[in-house]
């Protein structure tokens, strides 16, 4: 492989994902600003529910990622039957996750929202925030099924090296989302003014549109995707093969679920410092999530490229690619740090909220920006280790570290010290430097170099 070809291949896979996720996050940012114009309670309510829904999203992502390792390697091997068994396993896994997720949110959604409503803040009403959060969550539940189904197709297409269809589906859905957000939040052109509930309805509509576009378009051009031809001739798959993939993938699912839960727990810890903290974090996350699609997409691209190399037993290529893409991603993230720092003073001023919330939002953005290159490198380490099936290592590397170190540190600092929340946030972020050292050692040793689907 020539020096520049691995970068070209990575960008060919990653850029459509960046565009899709970037547009999605850009619309989320606009949604955020629209909801923020309704007041701090609305902004906080949507932020809390978004954090809870994020745990579900990561559970779906984790549940599909385990089989996805095999999907990329089966495709690299040219094994259609194996690839189709992976797809069918994804259907079963997703059905279980959706059922459990909806049950939890219906039965305990109000209690989960209440966990984030601590203390008081000038101009904020905890009871009003809870009510709006509950209404928003109940509508958002209708979007869980189309979201999950879209991820099955999008992941399978990407494992075949196709990123364009998921990107286009995402673009179409975000136009639907932003248009109906405007119409339903503010009650324009004869539509009812539904405020927070309108934002939820628009999001659910966009989820269904995205699912329809990616599924219908894929099957309309099925000749290009021979590995998916006849995919629904049965939904059964060999029990032995399914067991192997589930056992290998379960640590990934558990990792993603616990990591997302850890992020929710971190936010809950920060909320001990007052109601205004959630609103400040929401402002920061809105702009930071717009840019972190770069290293997230690069991580996915690294996993696919290296997985295909490993499936073809091209071990030296896999090792060289991992090293090159690690530094390439770090360089991209340095550029993002500069962009975020430049936005930090302007972006919070766009929100109709208190000066205290704007100040917190500004400094959360700056602190997050400083650690962007570290997060980019960690993401590459994670997908490199995972591509070779080292799921137990990634479980320890990611979610176990989050709970044992990050959450514990945040809880202790928020509960037993008088440190301001910004200092706590910076200290928790800096703990990830430990993971950088450990990840570098593991990747350099090549413990992940394994062909999981060798005949």
Image (cartoon, rainbow, N blue to C red):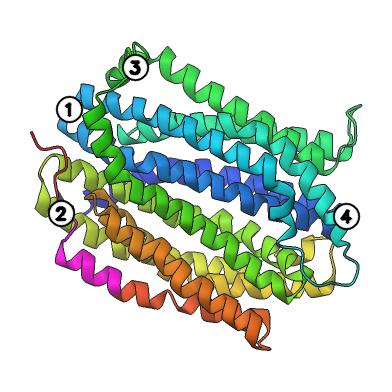
Q: Nearer the viewer, mark 1 or mark 3?
A: 3
Name the residue carrying label 2. Answer: 449
User: Residue placed at 23% from the left, 38% from the top?
Assistant: 244
Q: Where does residue 296 sit, x and y in percent of width and height? A: 44, 53
30 lies left or right of 315: right
Q: Residues within 10 Å of mark 3 (few under 14, many from 20)?
A: some
Q: Look at the picture and state if 52 lies above or below 180.
A: below
Mark 1 vs mark 3: which is more N-terminal? Answer: 1
Q: Where does residue 215 sit, x and y in percent of width and height? A: 48, 21
Tally of numbered tags: 4
Mark 1 vs mark 4: which is more N-terminal? Answer: 1
Name the residue carrying label 1. Answer: 78
190 lies left or right of 80: right
Name the residue carrying label 3. Answer: 231
Structural distance between the alpha carbons of marks 3 and 4:
48 Å
Structural distance between the alpha carbons of marks 1 and 3:
16 Å
Structural distance between the alpha carbons of marks 1 and 4:
56 Å
Is the magenta region chiefly helix, strand or loop? helix
Name the residue carrying label 4. Answer: 128
Q: Where does residue 221 sit, x and y in percent of width and height? A: 39, 15
- For residue 120, what is the image quadrant? bottom right
| SS of the residue under disc 2 | loop
| SS of the residue under disc 4 | helix
Q: Which residues are magenta?
A: 438-448
Structural distance between the alpha carbons of marks 2 and 3:
30 Å
Q: Look at the picture and state if 349 lies above or below 4.
A: below
User: Residue placed at 60% from the left, 81% from the top?
Assistant: 424
Mark 3 vs mark 4: which is more N-terminal? Answer: 4
| SS of the residue under disc 1 | loop
Q: Residues within 10 Å of mark 4 (few under 14, many from 20)?
A: few
Q: Nearer the viewer, residue 65 or 377?
A: 65
Q: Nearer the viewer, mark 1 or mark 4?
A: 4
């Amino acid at each position: 492989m020539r020096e520049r070809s691995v970068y070209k291949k990575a960008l060919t896979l990653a850029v459509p994902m960046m565009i899709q996720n970037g547009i999605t996050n850009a619309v989320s940012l606009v949604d955020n600003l629209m909801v923020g114009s309704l007041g701090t309670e609305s902004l906080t309510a949507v932020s809390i529910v978004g954090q809870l829904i994020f745990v579900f999203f990561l559970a779906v992502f984790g549940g599909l990622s385990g089989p996805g390792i095999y999907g990329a390697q089966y495709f690299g091997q040219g094994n259609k039957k194996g690839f189709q068994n992976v797809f069918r396993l994804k259907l079963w896994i997703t059905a279980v996750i959706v059922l459990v997720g909806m049950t939890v949110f219906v039965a305990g959604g109000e209690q989960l929202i209440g966990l984030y409503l601590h203390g008081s803040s000038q101009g904020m009403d905890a009871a009003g925030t809870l009510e709006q959060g509950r209404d928003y969550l109940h509508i958002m539940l209708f979007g869980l099924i189309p979201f999950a189904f879209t991820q099955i197709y999008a992941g399978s297409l990407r494992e075949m090296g196709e990123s364009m269809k998921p990107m286009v589906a995402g673009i179409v859905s975000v136009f639907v989302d932003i248009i109906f957000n405007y119409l339903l939040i503010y009650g324009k052109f004869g539509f009812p003014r539904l405020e927070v509930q309108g934002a939820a309805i628009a999001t659910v509509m966009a989820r269904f549109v995205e699912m329809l576009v990616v599924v219908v378009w894929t099957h309309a051009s099925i000749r290009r995707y021979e590995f998916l031809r006849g995919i629904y001739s049965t939904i059964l798959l060999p029990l032995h093969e399914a067991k192997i993939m589930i056992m290998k993938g379960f640590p990934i699912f558990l990792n993603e679920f616990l990591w997302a839960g850890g992020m929710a727990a971190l936010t809950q810890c920060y909320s001990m410092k007052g109601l205004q903290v959630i609103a400040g974090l929401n402002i920061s996350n809105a702009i930071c999530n717009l840019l972190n699609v770069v290293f997230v997409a690069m991580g996915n691209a690294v996993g696919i490229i290296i997985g295909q190399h490993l499936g073809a037993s091209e071990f030296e290529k896999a090792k060289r690619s991992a090293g090159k893409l690690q530094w390439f991603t770090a360089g991209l993230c340095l550029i993002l740090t500069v962009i975020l720092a430049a936005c930090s003073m302007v972006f919070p001023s766009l929100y109709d909220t208190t000066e205290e919330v704007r100040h917190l939002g500004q400094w959360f953005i700056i602190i997050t920006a400083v650690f962007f290159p570290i997060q980019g490198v960690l993401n590459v380490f994670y997908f490199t280790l995972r591509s070779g099936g080292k799921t137990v290592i990634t479980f320890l590397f990611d979610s176990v570290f989050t709970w044992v170190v990050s959450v514990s540190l945040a809880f202790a600092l928020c509960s037993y010290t008088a440190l301001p929340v910004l200092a706590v946030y910076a200290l928790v972020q800096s703990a990830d430097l430990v993971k950088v050292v450990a990840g570098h050692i593991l990747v350099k040793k090549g413990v992940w170099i394994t062909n999981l689907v060798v005949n």
